[in-house]
Image (tube, coloured by chain):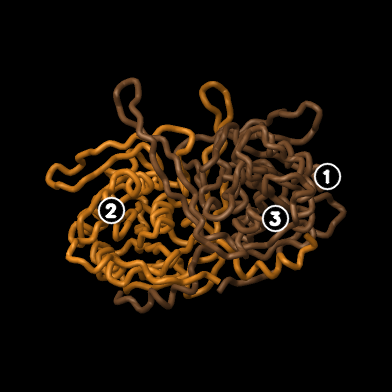
Chain colours: A brown, B orange
Amino acid sequence: MCIFTLSIAAPMTNQKPLILITNDDGITAPGIRTLIDVMKELGDICVVAPDSPQSGMGHAITINDTLYCDKVVVDKDSDQNEYSCSGTPVDCVKLAVNEILKRKPDLCVSGINHGSNSSINVIYSGTMSAAVEAGTLGIPSIGFSLLDYSLEANFDPVRNFVKTIAQECLSKGLPKGIVLNVNFPKLSENEIKGIKVCRQANAHWIESFDKRVNPLGREYYWLTGEFVNEDKGEDTDEWALKNGYVSVVPVQFDLTAHHAIKDINTWDL
Amino acid sequence: MCIFTLSIAAPMTNQKPLILITNDDGITAPGIRTLIDVMKELGDICVVAPDSPQSGMGHAITINDTLYCDKVVVDKDSDQNEYSCSGTPVDCVKLAVNEILKRKPDLCVSGINHGSNSSINVIYSGTMSAAVEAGTLGIPSIGFSLLDYSLEANFDPVRNFVKTIAQECLSKGLPKGIVLNVNFPKLSENEIKGIKVCRQANAHWIESFDKRVNPLGREYYWLTGEFVNEDKGEDTDEWALKNGYVSVVPVQFDLTAHHAIKDINTWDL
């Protein structure tokens, strides 16, 4: 199975931890502004985030086009370094680590996403793909998402949870090859029952396409879909979220289905 | 760990298997034209592929834009149904299954990609993400890639291997939640030593960005990178390919690192 080596944790020096912050909703989204506020309490921060919404971009990277990345001031009352990037969330992480930051960050946090990234949504999520990308570079990483797609979503109830989880990650580190997928139910702080470490629920989307005709007479489609969770387990992220808990799923980017190697070896190849 | 249920295989009827074909290099790429040729020997086919190159698009989906999907004739000497789609490889699969095909395909094949999708490349790959998407919909799926980025790549040496693997998949099925990532070395057919079922090598990219200035004086970047394989195992896809074998990695889309749940449960949350 997976090879475990030492956990990756922040170095034991007097230096403050360096925290890279990104997202997929764009650098001005309320979710990332909350995340910035919380992370400033934990270390030195650097923000490198998309200049426009990049939801559903998965692990896309820009290989056939140019990338722009400009230093910007989003919040005039703060002095953090912020960079707005024309690329995808994964591009942002690559640019930050290889071009912008002088040293490897001690933590990468992505989000707080406006909307769920639980269950199968993890594979479509730009938020989580940014965290995974940082993980492939050996950086302890967490993606945070709130189950509220609204641009006016209230992130205040989850601030303390975000801080606690990030603090624990900075002090304990993460096993190599693992990043965290954290989802918050849309509840007030005192309605949230606690935090559950979970597995990804076995769910999927059934899409339907809204077929329309453009003003020039050409047919086009809009993707719409229905989320179907057939997983009745009480150890899943979907169960936790429906029952008022914060879900934490350890996610790996070794996609090998090790248990299936034996099956495929019975084939006549 | 993962829940195993019955394997998914083609139904035992006299009906020919229905095979969905897609890729990420675009519908006119030589790789998909070879795949179409081979699959016509195995069943009824339908091609739904991007209208332009979509390499590195990962599991991106189009959620904030329109999708065009037009029936096209690429090969005048053939009568298969082909659709050219403005979206990503994953969009193509969603459109095919939910809008174009009258029944669920018995197999989805993606590729043959011009270039490697072994090791960590699987997470960036539009080719593999299309196969994974079909897998989430319960369709046995395989992504094929040749280690030759050239548009003039010679796919003839791998035709028999593609056919054998697809035939076995149609007859034996795949365990639920598993798709196959197949990579071919750039060798002649009789130089290829055979097929190895492998795990994904533990490798990553170290990026460097080529910084340039556009004609208007604004700085921009081009992503370039170096592939680093630190995995010395002889059971990996990288080892197989370097030693003249076809690599077959069973890939899962339950990303849960089940073995890490216990570790994270020791945190003070």
Residue B199 is left or right of residue B139, and the answer is right
> Which chain hosts label 2?
B
Secondary structure of the residue carrying tag 1 is: loop
> Which chain hosts label 3?
A
Residue drawn at (51%, 66%) of the image: B201
Same chain under badges 3 and 1? The reply is yes
Q: Quadrant of the C terminus of chain A?
A: bottom left
Secondary structure of the residue carrying tag 2 is: loop
Q: Residue furthest left?
A: B77
Asked where in the image residue B128 lies, by quadrant, the reply is bottom left
**Dot 1 crowding, Cα within 10 Å, few <14, some 14–19, many 20+:** few
**Amino acid type, callout 3:** Tyr
Give me the disc on residue A245: 3
Secondary structure of the residue carrying tag 3 is: strand
Distance, label 1 to label 2, CA atoms, is: 55 Å
**Residue A139 in view (yes/no):** no
The mark closer to the camera, 1 or 2, is: 2
The mark closer to the camera, 3 or 1, is: 3
**Amino acid type, callout 1:** Glu
Q: Quadrant of the N terminus of chain A?
A: bottom right
Distance, label 2 to label 3, CA atoms, is: 39 Å
Residue A95 is left or right of residue B22, and the answer is right
**Residue B32: x and y, percent?**
28, 51
Dot 3 and dot 1 residues touching (CB under 8 Å): no
Asked where in the image residue A64 lies, by quadrant, the reply is top left
* Circle 2 residue: B103
**Residue B202: x and y, percent?**
54, 65
* Above or below B191: residue B139: above
**Residue A8: x and y, percent?**
71, 62
Q: How many marks?
A: 3
* Circle 1 residue: A41
Q: In front: A175, or B202? A: A175
